[in-house]
Structure formats: structure tokens, C-alpha cells
Image (cartoon, rainbow, N blue to C red):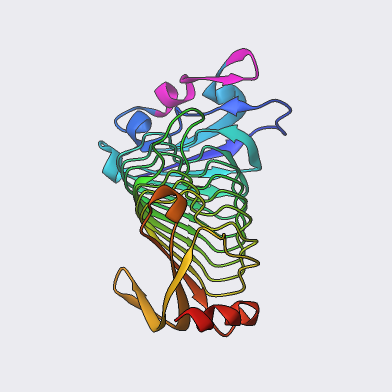
Amino acid sequence: MTLILKLKKKLSAPVSAECISPDTFAGKQESEIAGLTLWEGNRKRQLSEIFEVEGISGSSPSETTIHIKGDLSKTRRIGAGMTEGRIVIQGNGGMHIGEEMKGGTILVEGNAGSWLGSAMKGGVIEVKRNAGDYIGGAHRGSTKGMRGGVIIVHGNAGSEAGSHMRKGLIKIFGDADQFAGIYMKDGTIVVHGNSRGRLGAFMTSGKIVVCGKAESVLPTFSIDKINRKTKIHGDEIAGPFYVFVGDLAEHGNGKLYLSQTENEHLKSVELFL
């Protein structure tokens, strides 16, 4: 069953939209969904004041699909905590999409804001364009980031992707800004483009793969070997790759896989093999 939400106006203030979720919509009539409450800035609104509501929800979250049309860059927490079902954002999305998500799928056809999939535990989030900072990261003051699931970004990503990550997979097909994998405890990050460096700062375990150029490697990482290829969840990625181990300042055993052919500025490390 599919529900369609159409944004009625250009948003001038942030909208807290955690009620937009298959878990909340399942089993409700159209009028009940229209009467759900959310916050626009400091004003309490009904969903129907922000969105036109059309369609039918499923009897369970797994049978419910939500299509949202419009520029949602000022919305926050769409799909937060969802367990099943599907959300399709037909435009740009805002911050905290899929926060603490446990299952189901979210597709963003435009760009996504920061904290995409923050502290998520399961499910799949896919962004067709770019995403902001802290993909799969922890909340402020927390040390528990992404703990499961998959995040796929087809464009570029901001800084600190996978911060405090403990499990799961993040795939970035464009470039990643600085500090990808900071405080990483486990899980996998793959950057098919370039990285601006400072990869894996304070990481203790996990795996980061960069198929493009990495501007620098922190001095607390040590070269271990050169691999012809690597595998990510059963998929093979051709190398060769320099393999670094660290963060040694944290007694870490995380792995950085950096393309040998794209990082000629690192060739001097081969003297230590």
C-alpha cells in the first residue's frame, strides 16, 4: 500500500518529522495520518498543514510505502526508528534521516543532510546524490554510532563519515571529506572516490577502503603489506592496495586499504615492507 505526501509550501523553519514512518502510518486511515502532529520551528502543526496526504497505508509497517514529494532539506528525522517498510523522498532530504533505524529501506533521490542514518541498527538507506557530515555517526555526547545496516551514497560525503561506527557498511561512490572512520570500533567504509585524509583517527578496529587518492595517512598508522585485492561483504574490489594498521596510539588494529596506483605520494612506505 502506498501513501503520497506532497509538500504544500516552501519551508522557512525546520520541521521535526519523525512521525513520517511506516511504523506510525501503518493501520491508520488517511484522516488519522493527516491529523498526526509535528513541529515547524516552535509551532505545533498537524501533518495536513504541511503536506497533502493521499493514498492508503498498509495494515503493517512492512506493507506500507511512503512517497514524499518536495524539497525536504529543512525537515529532520524522517524515518527515525523505523523497523520495516519503505520511504522514498522524491527530492532533497534534511538532517537525521533514518536516525536509529532498525529495518526497512529509505531512498533519497536528491541530496541528504547531516547525520544520515545516525546510530542506525539495521535496514538500508540509499542517497542518489550527495550527503552531509557524520553519515552513520553517533549523537552528540554518545560513543555509539552505526551498529548495523547499510548506507549507500552515490555522490560525495561530508566529514566524519562513520564516526564511532561499531558495525555495518557505508559505501560512498564519490569523495569523502576528512576524518572518515574517526573513533571507529568495527564495520566497513568504502570510498570509491578520493579522501581528504585523516582516515581512521582514533579507530581501534574495522576496515576503511579508499579506491581513489588519500591526501595523507596519519603517522599513527603503520604500513603492513600490499594486497592485490580486497573483499567487502563478498564483493571483490581490485587493487593493488597499501594496507595500513592503526590507530597505534589507541592500540588499534583497524585496517586502511589505500589504492597503490592512485597514491604514488605514498610510495616511500614500500621501503618498510
Placement of 118 over or under 39, stated as above or below: below
Q: Is residue 8 left or right of residue 148?
A: right
Kindly give the residue lying farthest to the front in the view shown: 272
Placement of 31 over or under 239, stated as above or below: above
- 64 or 175, which is in the foreground? 175
The quadrant of the picture occupied by the N terminus is top left
| Residue drawn at 37 percent across, 48 percent down | 185
Residue 24 quadrant: top left
- Measured as percent of width and height from the top left, residue 154 is found at 55, 64
Q: Is residue 34 one of those drawn in magenta? A: yes
State the extent of the magenta-drawn residues as a range: 30-44
Kindly give the residue lying farthest to the top in the view shown: 43
Placement of 192 over or under 105, stated as above or below: below
Residue 121 quadrant: top left
- Measured as percent of width and height from the top left, residue 262 is found at 60, 81
| Residue drawn at 44 percent across, 27 percent down | 19
Q: How many marks?
A: 0
Q: Is residue 50 left or right of residue 161?
A: right
Q: Is residue 267 left or right of residue 138?
A: right
- Measured as percent of width and height from the top left, residue 63 is found at 29, 44
- 232 or 126, which is in the foreground? 232
- 166 or 31, which is in the foreground? 166
- Measured as percent of width and height from the top left, residue 258 is found at 51, 73
Q: Is residue 185 one of those drawn in magenta? A: no
